[in-house]
Image: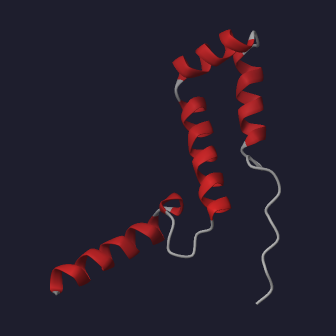
Amino acid sequence: MTDRYNIHSQLEHLQSKYVGTGHSDTTKFEWLVNQHRDSASAYIGHGNLLDYFALAENETKARVRFNLLEKMLQPCGTPPQRPEE
């Protein structure tokens, strides 16, 4: 029983520390937004991936970086309407 309590407290601590891990109230939209932002930040942070995308799109690295940063604002479009409770 104490192991179960310990696991839940560790999970709660992890979820409060890192936004992208989600929690029980995380919606599908919020989870997708976190995934897209994590992916875009990884692409920007790794120079080789940025080189690859720039070459594939026939754009400069600066333009690809700018486009990825722009997509981080609303990567999945506008948030859906929440139902009134």
Determine the image quadrant of residue 62: top right
In the image, 24 versus 70, the foreground residue is 24
Which residue is depicted at the point 39% across and 67% down? 14
In the image, 20 versus 79, the foreground residue is 79
* Image vertical order of residue 10 relative to residue 52, above or below: below
Image check: 10 left or right of 20? left
- Residue 76 horizontal/vertical position (percent): 74, 49
Position of the N terminus, as image quadrant, is bottom left
Q: How many marks?
A: 0
Which residue is depicted at the point 53% across and 62% down? 19
Which residue is depicted at the point 51% across and 65% down? 22
Image check: 63 left or right of 27? right
- Residue 50 horizontal/vertical position (percent): 61, 21
Determine the image quadrant of residue 59: top right
* Image vertical order of residue 69 relative to residue 13, above or below: above
- Residue 83 horizontal/vertical position (percent): 79, 80
Position of the C terminus, as image quadrant, is bottom right
